[in-house]
Structures are given as structure tokens and as C-alpha cells.
Image (tube, rainbow, N blue to C red):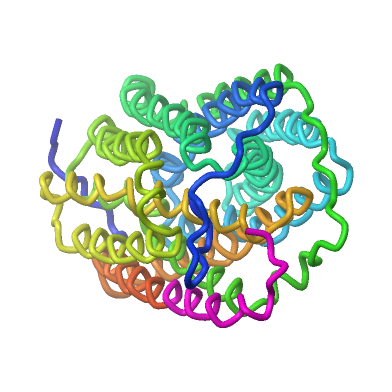
Amino acid sequence: MRRRARRHAGHPGQRGLSAPSTPTPPTIPAAPPGKAIGTGGVRALYAAYFAFVGLFSPYLSLWFDSRGLSIGEIAVLLSLPQVLRIVAPPFWGWLADRGGHRVALLRISAVAALVVLLLFPLATRPFEYALVMLALCFLTAAQMPIGEAIALDLARGDAGRYGRMRLWGSVGFIATVLAGGPLLEAFGLAALPWLLAAAMAVLVGVTFAVPEPPAPPARAGAVPIAERLREPAVLAFLASAFLMIFAHAALYSFFSLFLERQGWGTTAIGAIWGIGVVAEILLFMLQRRLFEHASAMRLLAASFVVCGVRFAMIGVSEGALWVLVCAQLMHAVTFGLHHSASMAVLHRWFEPAQQARAQAAFIVVAYGLGGSLGGLAAGWLWTEVSPAAAFHGAAAAGFAGALAVVLAARLERLERPRAPGRPA
């Protein structure tokens, strides 16, 4: 399982926001029975999309490395998906909320992404890689803001129901991340673009099997989304989201390379990634109890503290398996719990007819700005200081994010008396 490390010259991978006095109940009435039929389609969407991500995120840096690119070039290329998340999600979210044809947009973007993936092996230079990455990431950026908006509409504030849908994304991810390692060892890293195309083809099929849900109506007198996004508590919350994904950029961009430099093969790398996803699945299955006993803000703050500890552990691990296993188990909190608590906040603060745009704003700030700047910062720390320093920087961002959550909670307590009409 373990092998000698290769040496590379020049290289060093529910409940929403709680009120200050009267807590909001963890759930609200479930959707009408007829609407529950759509949850199966959402589960399939999550599974198919994250099956693609399970091949894309852990192994793409290894594929670029096998093509002879430097760590600096890899860092820039892997920051492009985050840069596109600054531009693409608002576009797709605006189209989805304005036109109401959410599943149709998922179909169009998935088909076009499949075409781009078939062109991927033809690229040979960094500029060509950048072009195909930009096109691919613009198209795949449609999936999450629209998919999450549909899921939140169906969940209707029930953390348990949302978790049961969302866990299928984790199932899809772990299936491909575990299968990807042996497949790439058997057929070589050159097979990765074709595996990605096969995963995208499955997503295309799923989108054509999902019926179009009715568009949510706009509520008369609702606070405009632009005004809501400028509220200080919302800005502090978005700042915390930025810091969480800034921290995770080191994981998504360089964790696989870090493990490879420590002597682990692709099968072992896939298994180590899989540990985190198994923990994440268990969290989604059991999270309703957490949301019954703590507010989303408290759970968010806890996720950031765990984030800081997790990445500090990876930075000092030197490839020790027991440390890596413990750190990966914390993924249940730093991704799973953080994600569900963030979705609870967004569901509470924004109207159903605003959800796709609210999701887009979250993705822009967190994954767009946070992911791109975090990836560049991690790449700089890796090359100029050490690979471990990239994860120590991520730990610092995690602890800073906890302070942003505390600030958001305090601002919420100050704002709420002035906004009695805000939806609970």
C-alpha cells in the first residue's frame, strides 16, 4: 500500500440563525406530500454530480503533474474553478430564479460540459489547459446553486430531510474516489479525462430523468435580495464562509500531492480521501439531533475550531497514517456540519424565490473568492516555505473564521429588534 516517495525536481492536492431570546424551532412543517416525490430526483442529482467531483478534485492535480506542469502552473489551473465561481453562479442563479426552468438549465450545462471534457485530452500547453478548465468550470458551476435551491425548497427547513438528500452526494463522491485510485493505477493517469467524461455522461442522463419542479412564488413585501446581502450580519456570515473554503483550498488543491510526496500510492490516496467522506455521510444521517440541541451559529463556530485543529494536524503529520485518519474524520464537521448549518442560515434569511441567487452569492464569496485566493496562497506557501506550511496557513484561516461567526451572531442580535418582519 505504501511505497517509496518519488523525488521531483522543483517540487517541495434545524435550525437557522437563532434569535437572541426565543429559539426558532428546528423544523417547520414539511412540504405537501405530492412534493416529496421530487426528493428522489434531487438525491440522484447529488450522487451524479459529486461522483464527477470525486474524480475531479482528488486526481486532477496528479494528472497535471504527470503532464509535466510545475507546482506553480498546477496552482493557477486549480484556482480557475474558484475564479469561475465568482462569475458563473450569479449568472446561473439569476437565470434560474428569473425563468423558473431550473432543471432545463441543469441539462443544458451538463451536456455542454460533457462536450468540453471530450476535448480535454487534446490540450498540451498550459494555455490550452486553462481554456478547457475555464469552459468546464463555467458550465459545472450551474449544478450546485440550482440543485441546492431545489433541495432547500423540498426540505422546507427540516435539517434531517435535507441531510438525507445531501448524503447521496457523499455516496457518489466516495464511490468514485475509491474506485478512481485502482482504475488509475491499472490504466494510468492518462485515463482520467475519459473517466471524468463518463461521470459527466451519467449526470446528463440524470438531469433528463428529473421532472421540472414548479417555480417558487415571490412573496409580496419581501426584502430585496440585494438589500439583504448588505446587512452586516449577512456580510460577517459570508466572510466566515470565505475563510472556511480558503482553508479547504489547501486540501482540495494539494492534499493528494502532499500524500504522494509522503510515499502513498493512488489507491491509498483514494482510501484516505474516502475516510473523510464516510464520516461526512454519517454526519448527514445523524445531523437532525445536532440541530435540535444547538443553533446553526453555534454549530458553525464549532466547525471552524475543528477546521483549525484539522489542518494543523495535517501540517505536522509527516504522512503518519493515524494522524491523517483522525484529520480526515474531522471532515464530517469541517465540511458536512459547516455545509448544513450554512444552508440552514441561507434558507432562513432568503425567500424561496431568492434561493438560487442566495446560493450563488454564497458560492461566489466562499468557493469563488475563498477558493481561488486560498489555492494561490497554499501554492505560494508550498513553494516558498514548505508543503506543511500550506496546511498551517489553512489552520490559521479556520480559527479566524470562528471569530467571524461570533461577530455574525452578535450583529444578528443587534439587527433583529430593528427587523421584526424578517422571516423566521
Task: Write the residue at 70% across / 24% down.
Answer: 207
The vertical placement of 238 against 35, above or below, is below
**Image spot of residue 408 (x, y percent):** 50, 75
Q: Which residues are magenta?
A: 404-424
Q: Quadrant of the N terminus?
A: top left
Which residue is at the front of the view, 53 or 32?
32
Is residue 349 located in the magenta-colored stretch of the structure?
Answer: no
**Image spot of residue 140 (x, y percent):** 65, 41
Would you say 271 lies left or right of 422 here?
left
Q: Quadrant of residue 334?
A: bottom left
Please say whether residue 260 is visible from this viewpoint. no
Which residue is at the front of the view, 291 or 75?
291
**Image spot of residue 63 (x, y percent):** 43, 40
Task: Write the residue at 78% across / 36% down.
Answer: 102
Task: Write the residue at 47% across / 31% down.
Answer: 164
The vertical placement of 365 against 255, above or below, is below
Q: Main secondary structure of the magenta part?
A: helix
